[in-house]
Amino acid sequence: MNIFIASSNQGKIKEIKAILADSSLNLLSILDVFELQKMGIEIASDFDVIEDGKTFQDNALLKAKAYAIKTGLPTIADDSGLEVQTLNGFPSVNSNRWFEGTASERNLALLDLLKDKTDRQARFYSVICFFDPKNNSVQFFDGEIQGKIASESKGSKIEGFGYDPIFIPEGFNQTFAELGAEFKNTISHRRIALAKLNQYVLQDKHLGQLE
Ligand code: ITT
């Protein structure tokens, strides 16, 4: 069962593949150039979708639909972000866009916004959209993980992407980057949303639609 991952973020693609490694799904992305070529699918490595939706759901749908139309494959897209309580949920859907610079520069900029704040509560939120171009069916699955923003960036040279070096999941005292991808993938917002997706596609009544 082929499913395309609608993402240009290599860290995210790697996580989605790792989380669903034990499922029966054959996951493809822009990185699988040869496999796609064999299937007669051409998609540029810089294929881009303008994410101008107001919500995670809007943007997840925009991405899933665009890649599904391009590839002809059932497609999943993840739209996700970090929401910091004392900043009224900022940066939320703009997590990848509010600051121009590298991920580590952005992490430092966020730490700077929080430098005098004692309330460090935050959450990661993910919405996965599943779009099947055969019948235009759309499904959404979500997941969240609560935690706090660290006082400094830690573990950036170890593993992870984005805000992983500054996010400490609830119940732990190390950042996601320090805890490592293998562990992160057992508890993350993305894991929770993808587990729901996996349940959905494995139900008999949906199997017939996917080849
Ligand atoms: P695609 O849209 O191509 O999938 P993107 O990185 O632009 O890639 P989003 O629009 O969903 O993806 O932006 C989500 C941003 O939120 C992401 O770039 C990270 O900065 C942050 N983020 C989301 N989940 C994260 C995680 O598990 N660890 C660290 N940062 C995360």
Image: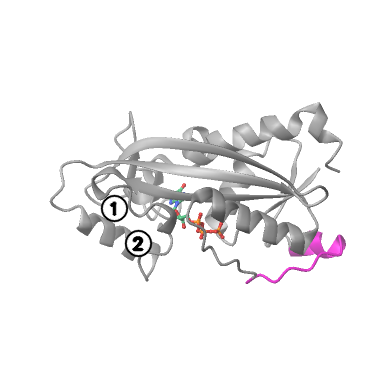
Q: Estimate how packed mark 1 is, as few (under 14), some (14 to 19) or many (20 or more) residues with alpha carbons within 10 Å.
A: some
- Lower sequence index among marks 2 and 1: 2
147 or 86: nearer the viewer: 86
Asked if one can make out residue 6 in the rendered structure from this viewpoint, the answer is no
Image location (x, y in percent) of residue 45: 66, 70
Q: Is residue 13 left or right of residue 165?
A: right
Which structural element holds mark 1? loop
Q: CA distance from mark 2 to mark 1?
A: 8 Å
- The residue where tag 1 is placed is 153
- The residue where tag 2 is placed is 104
Which structural element holds mark 2? helix
Asked if one can make out residue 4 in the rendered structure from this viewpoint, the answer is yes
**Pointer 2 with pointer 1, Cβ within 8 A:** yes
Q: Amino acid at mark 1?
A: Ser
Q: Is residue 185 left or right of residue 117?
A: right
Residue found 24% across the figure and 51% down from its top:
152
178 or 136: nearer the viewer: 136
138 or 71: nearer the viewer: 138
Q: Is residue 45 magenta?
A: yes
Image location (x, y in percent) of residue 95: 41, 57
**In the rendered image, which quarter contains the C terminus?**
top right
The magenta span reads: 33-46
Label disc, if present, on residue 87 of the rendered structure = none
Image position of 84 with respect to 104: above or below? above
Q: Amino acid at mark 2?
A: Ser
12 or 125: nearer the viewer: 125
Residue found 32% across the figure and 65% down from its top:
105
**In the rendered image, which quarter contains the N terminus?**
top right
